[in-house]
Image (cartoon, rainbow, N blue to C red):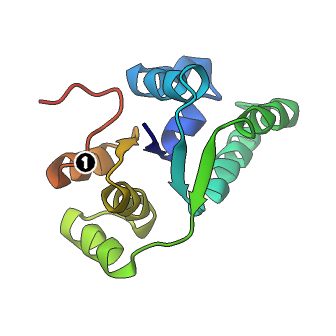
Amino acid sequence: MAFVLDASVTIAWAFEAEANPVSQEAWRRCFELYEDVEAPSLWWFEVRNSLLVSERRQRITPARTAGFLKALANLPMSLDRQIGEAALLSLARDHVLTAYDAAYLELAQRKRLSLATLDKALAAAARASGVPLIGVTPT
């Protein structure tokens, strides 16, 4: 089954020390179970910006960035460009999210998919909205 992948989980894959149950489960579902992944189109920019910032902080080399992006090219991913503006703004207002984070939640709601995120505010908003979270045991 497909799920929505946010940039925080994707970037955790680039750094071994950031492995956690959410990122590991999302990795397993992508690269071992070959599940389809969806993300709003802003994911492409967020991932690359995070990698560039990590290069500037000397956490990763340009060569590792290139290798990581090459590995990501194998993701069974679809970038969504059909954001529901009214729903996005409502989610952002109701849950005090950035428009960027609300885009992931809006996509998960619209397509009735689970969400993989490490962002605490986004995870809380997903729980409050009834969106299942990847790698998190329901409470």
Examine the rendered structure and indicate whether residue 43 appears above or below residue 66.
below
Examine the rendered structure and indicate whether residue 46 appears above or below residue 75.
below
Residue 3 rendering spot, x and y as whole percentages: 43, 42
- At x 53%, y 43%, the residue is 37
Looking at the rendering, which quadrant does residue 14 occupy? top right
Circle 1 residue = 131
Decide which of 26, 57 is in the foreground and name it.
26
Residue 134 rendering spot, x and y as whole percentages: 35, 33
The amino acid type, in three-letter code, at marker 1 is Val
Outermost right residue: 63
The C terminus, quarter of image? top left
Label 1 Cα crowd, 10 Å radius (few <14 / some 14-19 / many 20+): some
- At x 65%, y 55%, the residue is 44
Decide which of 17, 135 is in the foreground and name it.
135
- At x 50%, y 72%, the residue is 82
Q: Is residue 7 visible?
A: no
Looking at the rendering, which quadrant does residue 43 occupy? bottom right
Residue 26 rendering spot, x and y as whole percentages: 48, 29
Outermost bottom residue: 86
Residue 121 rendering spot, x and y as whole percentages: 29, 50
- At x 30%, y 69%, the residue is 92
Q: Is residue 19 visible?
A: yes
Q: Is residue 59 left or right of residue 128?
A: right
Q: Is residue 115 left or right of residue 51?
A: left
Outermost left residue: 139
The N terminus, quarter of image? top left
Query: What kind of element bears circle 1?
Result: loop
Decide which of 135, 80 is in the foreground and name it.
80
Q: Is residue 59 left or right of residue 65?
A: left
